[in-house]
Image: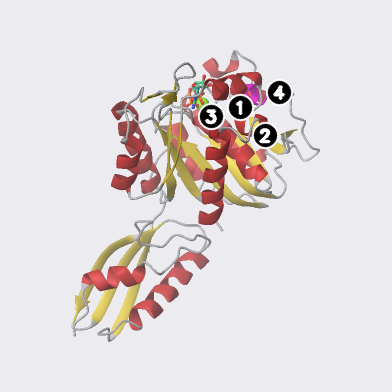
Amino acid sequence: MAVSEEQVRDALKSVKYPGFSRDIVSFGLVKSVKIDNGEVKVQLALATADPNVPAAIKNDAERTLRELAGVQNAKVLIDIHAPPGGAGATVGTARIPGIKHVIAVASGKGGVGKSTIAANLAVALEQTEARVGLCDCDIYGPSISLMFGTRERPMATEENKIVPIEQYNLKLMSMGFLLDDTSPAILRGPMVTRYTQQFLRQVEWGELDYLVLDLPPGTGDIQLTIVQTVALSGAIIVTTPQEVALIDARKAATMFEKVNVPVIGLIENMSYFICPGDGKRYDIFGSGGGEREAKRLRVPLLGQIPLDIATREAGDRGMPIVGEDRQSEVGQAFLKIAGRIRETLV
Ligand SMILES: Nc1ncnc2c1ncn2[C@@H]1O[C@H](COP(=O)(O)OP(=O)(O)OP(=O)(O)O)[C@@H](O)[C@H]1O
Ligand SMILES: [Mg+2]
């Protein structure tokens, strides 16, 4: 019996991306499958600075395919892409020593709640006993210092490294700690890129399980620089259920796809509002958008966060809601998301 392309793709679903519980098919690495008289040729594409990753995938995939009935021989070819051109292309992706996983929180559209999600997610991950850092990469509108209620200025070590601020057992770094209120306006284009790179590389994080990056809105040069400056384990895309936000979420997903950063999943924010007066649910920005988009992008919908007064107030007060009230609906939702992330990034 001749083996079919579907059987080959199915078999490849058992090959995990090294360090992940997700497989190479769901990460979209399989570019083509050719079958000729029992000879299977699979073309994969990925970008990584670590030579062990393609080697492990190749071995694993070839062994899996050779075990399939009807396969005489299996060859897996891997196309390792250089990151695409752009502001940060010359620098190349680097791992930050001591950090197991770097996760970027992005959105495309502004104001959908990235910083709120990044802050709460960091606190939720910390509550699962992980060592966590949070880095605000928004040079034009840093907000993490506000959400954590600190204006403390970080110190530098003798080697000229910046020491993160510690708050609620998290390590925090924000451009907001370094800039005064007027400086963003004078930083433009290439300077922002250089500044961002320097910023990301010069922080002394120490040993961390997760570093969460709060990205600025959009999918332009700055975002591209960031996602190329450090080796990311994956990205989380935040969206509201509204079509305008979904369109931009799609753009963000495309950006990560281009630089071969896997999208861990989507988080839908401002999904609904429960009116404290009558207890009724209102879908202010529509409903079902996050779920549809997650299906379209073939990534999990990690959670839905309601529009919630306490969440906004807690952020304004300088203590993310998960830290303030983990039993609340929103607190529980974030803890669940943190659990799913821990399952995905092993
Ligand atoms: N689930 C929520 N319930 C209530 N308010 C929220 C929620 N999520 C975010 N907000 C509020 O919405 C505003 C925008 O959120 P936030 O700053 O997190 O968005 P952002 O995507 O990071 O914005 P920017 O694109 O400017 O970086 C904030 O005032 C925040 O408190
Ligand atoms: Mg923000």
Ligand 2 closer than 8 Å to label 4 CB: no
What type is the residue that disc 1 sits on? Ile
What type is the residue that disc 4 sits on? Thr
The magenta region covers 144-149
Say few, some or many: other residues with alpha carbon within 10 Å of mark 4 (under 14 / 14 to 19 / 20 or more): some
Instruction: Give the percent coordinates (x, y) of residue 265.
Output: 43, 46
Residue tagged by mark 3?
115
Which image quadrant: the C terminus? bottom right
Q: Report helix, strand or loop for mark 2.
A: strand
Please name the residue shown 71% across and 23% down the image: 150
Residue tagged by mark 1?
144
Q: Which label belongs to residue 172?
A: 2
Q: Which label belongs to residue 71?
A: none
Ligand 2 closer than 8 Å to label 3 CB: yes
| Between discs 1 and 2, the one toward the N terminus | 1
Whether residue 87 is visible, yes or no, is no
Marks 3 and 1 close (CB-CB < 8 Å) = yes
Marks 4 and 1 close (CB-CB < 8 Å) = no
Front-most of residues 270 and 60: 270
What is the spatial separation of the Cα atoms under label 3 and label 4, in whole angstroms?
A: 15 Å
Q: Report helix, strand or loop for mark 3.
A: helix
Please name the residue shown 39% across and 58% down the image: 46
Identify the residue at the far right of this view. Answer: 158
What is the spatial separation of the Cα atoms under label 4 and label 1, in whole angstroms?
A: 9 Å
Quadrant of residue 241 in the image?
Answer: top left
Question: In the image, is 8 to the left or to the right of 186?
Answer: left
What is the spatial separation of the Cα atoms under label 1 and label 2, in whole angstroms?
A: 8 Å
| Between discs 2 and 3, the one toward the N terminus | 3
Secondary structure mostly seen in magenta is helix
